[in-house]
Image: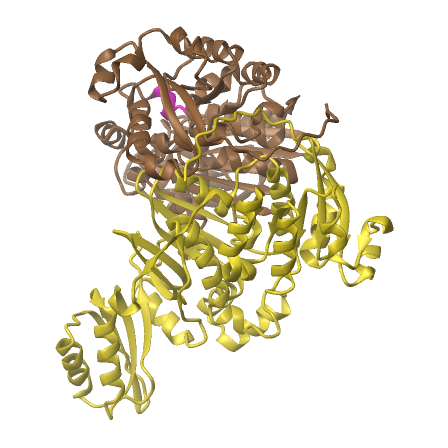
Chain colours: A brown, B yellow
Amino acid sequence: MFINIRVTIILMVKIINVGLIGLGTIGSGVVEILKNNSHSIEKRTKINLKGVCDLNEQLAKRLNLDEKIFTKDYKDLINNKDIEVIIELIGGYEPAHTIIIEAIRAKKHIITANKAVLAKYGYEIFEEAQKNNVNILFEAAVGGCIPIIKTIEETYSSDNIEKIYGILNGTTNYILTRMSEGMSYEDALKKAQELGFAEADPGFDVEGKDASQKLSILASLAFDAKIEQEILTEGITKITKKDIEYAKEMGYVIKLLAIGKKQNGIIELRTHPTMIPQNHIFASINDEVNAILFSGKNIGEIFLSGKGAGKLPTASVIVTDIIGAGSRTGITERHFEKAEIVDMGKIKSRYYLRFSAVDKPSVLAQISKILGDNSISIAAALQKEVNKDVVPIVIITHEVLEENLAKAVKECNNLDVIKEEIVIIRIEDLR
Amino acid sequence: MFINIRVTIILMVKIINVGLIGLGTIGSGVVEILKNNSHSIEKRTKINLKGVCDLNEQLAKRLNLDEKIFTKDYKDLINNKDIEVIIELIGGYEPAHTIIIEAIRAKKHIITANKAVLAKYGYEIFEEAQKNNVNILFEAAVGGCIPIIKTIEETYSSDNIEKIYGILNGTTNYILTRMSEGMSYEDALKKAQELGFAEADPGFDVEGKDASQKLSILASLAFDAKIEQEILTEGITKITKKDIEYAKEMGYVIKLLAIGKKQNGIIELRTHPTMIPQNHIFASINDEVNAILFSGKNIGEIFLSGKGAGKLPTASVIVTDIIGAGSRTGITERHFEKAEIVDMGKIKSRYYLRFSAVDKPSVLAQISKILGDNSISIAAALQKEVNKDVVPIVIITHEVLEENLAKAVKECNNLDVIKEEIVIIRIEDLR
């Protein structure tokens, strides 16, 4: 792997010619920043926008772009020998994937904010880039303007990263923040949509898929792992205002956390609503803000937070990547090793369980027995007095094997006295 | 300033030969990490330790370093043509400054964790590096393992940084954390010394000088400014348990903040104990942890925190800098412009004032009159009932010009009814 050639070079990269594909929100932001910040950018690098591609030429007109650099055919940019860097900002799997691969083969550095294409085709893209000796930069793909890719990449080289926790999806964090103030899930989602924080079809966000895609990218880099398995992914759609209230009473806040751990070579990955202590720094991350906490053997914990999305924050990071494109050794030198991902049944966690039971004296006894029979011991219990036939019982367990918990919950769900599906929320006792 | 030469280079720097000067805590940590992490480091770069210098050869023996690479004379390293990077870890002004300048003239890249030498001789060092086409990397000099230098450097190039707030000194943050739990200043300082977080002579830390040196480095980078004036610096020695309690009652926490702002080309810099809202993320930064919040016009707020000191965290960052030394365009391309620093009298702030007054009915009226005469309006007041002759009166002001406040406080201090010097703490209403 290690090439024994010594080449020391003092860099003098002063002009970078770029081609931009996709003039949507982020793409327009990049054009604006290149115009408005040219003074401070040029102190480091002159960025020439040599070509711009979009299917909609109105977008180019609106930005007052020179007609001569505009095209509807991305191949014009790839065939342009002057262009050294291609910025892909169209998102989604295709044609983004095809464009990136073709651009790499034409020896262009790639900058992208496309987490989907990286989560699905990342290893192919990195390998292709390596063969062609170009860089892939994608700081904007995870955590918006938080410099997490760079920080993990650099930490990786001098330390062993052991844990990553992330609030990686702004939509769900916005919804959970509103719910913690008393709003219902439905109203919070509606508000998020009105403010542009949630898509008309919010499934990808609220079901945790967006966060899991980002986790898979971070975990690859941090743990040096080729992650090809599906990541356990649970969204926030089952969380109710009641759960948030009970969590609060017990000193917890509920956040959608993406979690990655590596211990003795074995990797654990999961995205799900998580109860965390309310005095933990994550509890203060509200609205659409993203945050990442990771820990290394030498460095201890590092925490980063900032805007996870938005036109100018994201575009600003793309511009930073352009400046870095010619001068940084990127991800392409990495050789990800096939990773062993632990089966979810084998993880250990503490759990919050909410039972909706008929109001009979024997109920708690029946539940406790099942839990006990499955080696689950109870850390705290809360039974609410309500004037209804169905009463909520909340139980917090001590640490237990997930497969034991799943078995117990299944048995409890079969009890006649249990009237609704039991709500399960994992707890992380972050300090 | 802009050189119209186009040089695009794909980097293949695979071996870096380094010379290390100073085998104290951090230096030993670097040697350990290079040994223990060679596997993952070599995936990116092979780091050869070609020379090590210290006045104490026992330190080299303790680390099992090859005798052939050890020297007591730093000139041996500077004259060694194989060495490309010099790591300066002796600290202080001299001989660190001389060594760095000589190494630069011998065309070596420089890595240092020495905030003092950078705060005092930074511009000279950067200029010399520019002339000689070498890099200066100093991530470890501010905020320990928090990647703040890189992040500010990169943000600077694509955005306008407007504000920086930092908890940059671990010793004082440790002391304030213990005091917020009820410990006295003296006991907290003693505990910090026992744990190795505070020096035997803690003056440099507790008087805020360490934080101000770091602020001057960050502000230079963020605001592109040559900062040659003294920064207003107040330490924590006058803060009492009482002030921390009253602050808490009013919803605030006291932290030693380093503050930098740039508005319309004018820069404001200061380091002092600051009252911040207790639900702000800074309030959760406890013990010896450091944290930095900065905001850019495009990116919004970015928050970073992590260990600000310690052997392995700091050494780990030095190793990251080594890997970056050959492949990053560093600080040396910057041309800092002479900056206009605002006079402290002209800043506006809200203030916490604690008066120790005799228990007479007219006191509050006398104080209020003086404040009013100086255009200072009162936002909140708190008079404590105590069984003593001297009673504490706490006043929180609305925003006011510092020079007006200073004048009013001087007048109040002259009142017969005021028995001790008035305590003044500035408030930042961070959200």
Can you say which quadrant of the picture contains the N terminus of chain B?
top left
Image coordinates of residue A279 in percent, x first then y, are 43, 51
On screen, residue A11 versus residue A62, left or right, reads: right
In the rendered structure, does residue A2 fall within the stretch colored magenta? no
Front in this rendered view, residue B336 or B325: B336
**Is A200 situated left or right of B78 in this image?**
left
Q: Residue at x 44, y 67 (%)?
A: B180
Is any atom of residue A162 visible in this view?
A: no
> Closer to the camera, B181 or A77?
A77
Identify whether A13 is placed above or below B405: above
Going 31% across and 81% down the picture, which residue do you hit? Answer: B422
| Number of callouts | 0
**B206 relative to A148, above or below:** below
Tell me residue B296's x, y (percent). 34, 43
- Point out residue A152 in the picture as x, y percentages from the top left corner: 55, 36
Residue A408 located left or right of residue A33: right
| Residue B141 or residue B431, whichever sits in front | B141
Q: Choose top left, top right, bottom left or bottom right for residue A336.
A: top right
Could one spot residue A70 in this view of the protein? yes
Q: Which portion, as a residue range, is magenta? A: A203-208
Quadrant position of residue A55 = top left
Classify residue A11 as left or right of residue B387: right
What secondary structure predominates along the stretch shown in magenta?
A: helix
- Whether A311 is drawn above or below B293: the answer is above
Residue at x 25%, y 80% (from the top left corner)? B409
Identified at 45% across, 43% down, the residue is B153
Where in the figure is residue B192, as x and y percent of width and height? 58, 68
